[in-house]
Amino acid sequence: MSTKRIVYPRTGSFYQVLSSDVKSKSGLNPSCVILDEIWTYPNPDLARMLTTGSGDAREQPLFIYLTTAGNNLQGYGYEMHCKAKDILTGRRIDPTFLPIIYGLEEGDDWEDENNWYKANPSLGYTIQIERVREHFLQAKQDPAEEALFKQLRLNMWLKQQIKWMPMDTWEK
């Protein structure tokens, strides 16, 4: 366990960064768990260890899942993304899960700058539009950069890690 902590002595509460070692997390009873970049998780074991049964002794435990889109449509991050989409569309009901997704939908034109705001609601404030435009110009010239742009800037889930040929060229 990390020794770096933010402690609130009045209640004995603390925030602490945890390692990814799953076995050492058994028996924890957190009030809040923040799982970041879950698209990179090799499997759901860590997330499930920290959330299943955890917080049972807490009146209102809070579990927050955060992620950029990834390139593994079989992974835990994509599984959680699909759960969120199913709840948003009404295909699934889970009143304990509040899904918020920022990203382009299938069929959205990734080259249309107006669509970039769907994935980046603070574009122009915390993220400068000029930086995104620069990356876009690189993406137009290099399929690998296009994949990165779509994944990291537009939060689009990809089927593969590196593209060496644009799909429209392949299809021709």
Image: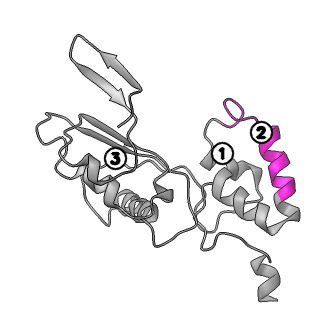
Query: Vertically, is 132 above or below 149?
Result: above
As drawn, is 117 to the left or to the right of 131?
Answer: left
- Which residue is drawn at the image coordinates 23% and 10% (left, top)? 10
Question: Judging from the image, what secondary structure is the residue with disc 2 in?
Answer: helix
As drawn, is 10 to the left or to the right of 141?
Answer: left
- Which of the two discs, 3 and 1, labels the residue nearer the N terminus? 3
The amino acid at mark 2 is: Ile
10 Å neighbourhood of mark 1: few (<14), some, or many (≥20)?
Answer: some
Give how far across and how far down residue 88 sits, in percent: 38, 57
The amino acid at mark 1 is: Tyr
Question: Judging from the image, what secondary structure is the residue with disc 1 in?
Answer: helix
- Which of the two discs, 1 and 2, labels the residue nearer the N terminus? 1
Residue 80, by quadrant, is bottom left
10 Å neighbourhood of mark 2: few (<14), some, or many (≥20)?
Answer: some
Residue interval drawn in magenta: 123-138
Q: Is residue 124 one of those drawn in magenta?
A: yes
- Which of the two discs, 3 and 2, labels the residue nearer the N terminus? 3
Which of discs 1 and 2 lies nearer the camera? The answer is: 2
Numbered mark located on residue 1 in the image? none
Q: Identify the residue position indicated by label 3 in the image.
A: 98
Query: Vertically, is 48 above or below 172?
Result: above
Query: Vertically, is 60 above or below 47?
Result: above
- Which residue is drawn at the image coordinates 81% and 59% (left, top)? 139
What separation in Å lies between label 1 and label 2 (alpha carbons)?
10 Å
Residues at circles 3 and 2 in contact by the CB criterion of under 8 Å: no
Q: Is residue 111 one of those drawn in magenta?
A: no
Q: Identify the residue position indicated by label 1 in the image.
A: 117
